[in-house]
Amino acid sequence: MSEWPKILHVEDDPEIREIALIALETVAGLSVVQCASGFEAIATAPSVVPDLFLLDVMMPSMNGVETLVALRANPIFANTSVMFMTAKAQQKEVLKLLEMGALAVITKPFDPMTLGQHIIDVWASRPQGS
Amino acid sequence: MQGIFDQVLSFGTLTNETVQLWSMTGLCLALLIVIARSIRISRNKGTLLSETAAELALLRQGMEKHAMINISDREWRMTFVNETLTTATGYSAEELIGHRFTEFLLAESSTKTSEIHAAMQLGMTWTGETRVLRKDGTSFWARSTIMPQLNAAGVVERLISIRTDITEAKKRQAEKQSRALLDGLPDQVYVFDTETLELIYLNQCALAFQQWDATEIAGKTLADTTNDLDPDDFRARMAPLRSGAQDMIRYDSEIRGVPVEIVLRQEFGFDGSSRFIAVVRDISERREVEKLKADFMATMSHELRTPLTSIKGALGVVSSGVVGQLTDKSAGMLLIALRNVDRLIHLINDFLDLEKLEAGQMDFRMEATDLSALIEEAVAANIGFGSTLGVTFATTGTGTPHVIMADRDRIFQVMTNLMSNAAKFSHPGGTVHLNLSATPHGARISIRDEGIGIPDAAKAYIFDRFRQVDDPEHRQRPGTGLGLNIVQSIVQKHGGRIWFDSAPGVGTTFFVDLHRDLHVVADESTLAA
């Protein structure tokens, strides 16, 4: 278990949060803390110290990218791994997110039965040492 | 009147030119009355006949200078042409004498010719506008008066025609009309010489845009209308228009920061001179609408996917049984719901792809792509789907790398689509054969199934949107009806080609040819930088 990441999941839609929680915790057995906004994530992260940020991209007032920038401002999270989730499956968008250093960009709708395993696989093959 | 004519003519001292004198009388009946009166006066008063002759000679000279005159015989063949006519038409008198004016010089419809004939037969004078052909093929407009001379039996003996060139007047009138029309247009209109690019006319809208008044056009050329016009480059671009290879050239450009659509045509004036007419339309509003549409599509994409994420997620979790055991019936119902959610997602994806392709907004990232690896990956991704149908995939030709320039993800999409089609239309237990081979210019991928085949009647529309083969066997295998249309668009955007062979009951093979190097795609702007 210890080699699996502790996840901070940020998603504004409460229903998607609920399904993601089942997919990650119940189905995949991952440890997850959820936040409803970027602001909440910034406030919560220091006490959680997650191994992986899982950020929704399109969120009101503070989007996923802005949230990441704000989180990175804290030295503790300068190198924390990040994955994005987006319903806007534009190739350009996806590339931009990958260029920001995201390990993966997960497109919505996701399959709740494979989401956790997919995250574990990507996590396991992440480049080490950074 | 005839009697007076004869008298006039008989007084003429220039007897060998009597015919010419006669000719002039036709035009100016009013003058003739004056002359006739003067003759009467001269008779009455017994003054010198030579005075009248001198007057007539003067009159003749004036007529000669002013008008084109010709006389024809009863066969309508010209027996006399004056110098003004020969100068105007470019023919010599010898070339014209003996020919019929109507056949030789008249560029008119036969209706006008028969109208003139009818008037002559009735002994009536005909007046109207006719177009006269020059020897060099050009033409001019003439106001014509044609008058018959009847013999005692009332039969046409001779005809006299007098014409004046009215091309200029007509041109001015026509231009006045068309310019009044053009001035009312909300688009900019520029008329300029095809060779020198000198401006001939700008409509109100164009003048306002350039901040000129109409008098300032003189001496300016097209290069004065915009900063970034290279005259030689422009002439080269307009060559197909000048040669007649194209009727119209249309392109989008920018003038002083304003996005515009430019439509160019070549026009010929009354005098045969050629010029270009450019209609420049401000399309900033259209661009704005296009942007709004793209934004709307992106938003819709997001708005549709968000609830679908919940639906698919909830159904998936419940049907997996992790939150509680299900009865077989409930599990079956949930599977139907799940399958249809997937279908809906697929449809939305296809629809958005089509929109993007149509608007030229689909991003193509052309990069060196190994087709062998790509095909193997596509097989791995589709094994699951194939196994639910009892179909397996077999590949040949993918043993060594085969690298071409392509958008990896899009070609993957093409492969997935063709493979799932092949599996869908195969019989359970069937195999779908994929082959990769080299061509002189790149690569060919074939996807062959041993399925039900495409009916002959459907072959013509298989790539059309929302067209699916309408028979029970095909209806059991639903799709969005957009897949092949998207596949075809993607292949074409790569400069490639897609086609198929199919025999009902035997199977179908789809072929995709792709170029090794980056092929010039019709719309370069669709290529990401």
Image: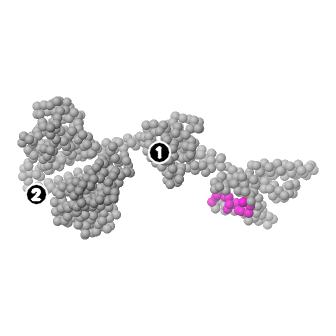
Which residue is disc 2 drawn over?
B329
Q: Any magenta on residue B436?
A: no
Residue under the point 30% across and 55% down: B487
State whether residue A46 is above or below residue A121.
above
Residue A46 x, y percent position in the rendering: 13, 31
Depth order, front residue of B233/B57: B233
Q: Left or right: A96 with respect to B125?
A: left
Secondary structure of the residue carrying numbered label 1 = strand
Label 2 is found on which chain of the structure? B
Q: Which mark is residue B176?
A: none
Is residue A2 visible from the viewing direction of this image? yes
Q: Which mark is residue B262?
A: 1
For label 2, the crowd category at 10 Å Cα-Cα, with few meaning under 14, some 14 to 19 and many 20 or more, is few
Tell me how far mark 1 sits from mark 2, CA to CA.
Answer: 65 Å
Image-quadrant location for residue A14: top left
Give the magenta-colored segment's residue range. Answer: B95-109
Q: Give the foreground label among 1 and 2.
A: 1
Q: Left or right: B473 with respect to B45?
A: left
Q: Are labels 1 and 2 assigned to the same chain?
A: yes
Residue B211 x, y percent position in the rendering: 52, 34
Image-quadrant location for residue B427: bottom left
Residue under the point 51% across and 46% down: B235
Q: Any magenta on residue B108?
A: yes
Label 2 amino acid?
Lys
Q: Left or right: B166 with respect to B204?
A: right
Query: Which image quarter is the C terminus of chain B in?
Result: top left
Query: Which image quarter is the N terminus of chain B in?
Result: bottom right
Residue B130 x, y percent position in the rendering: 66, 55
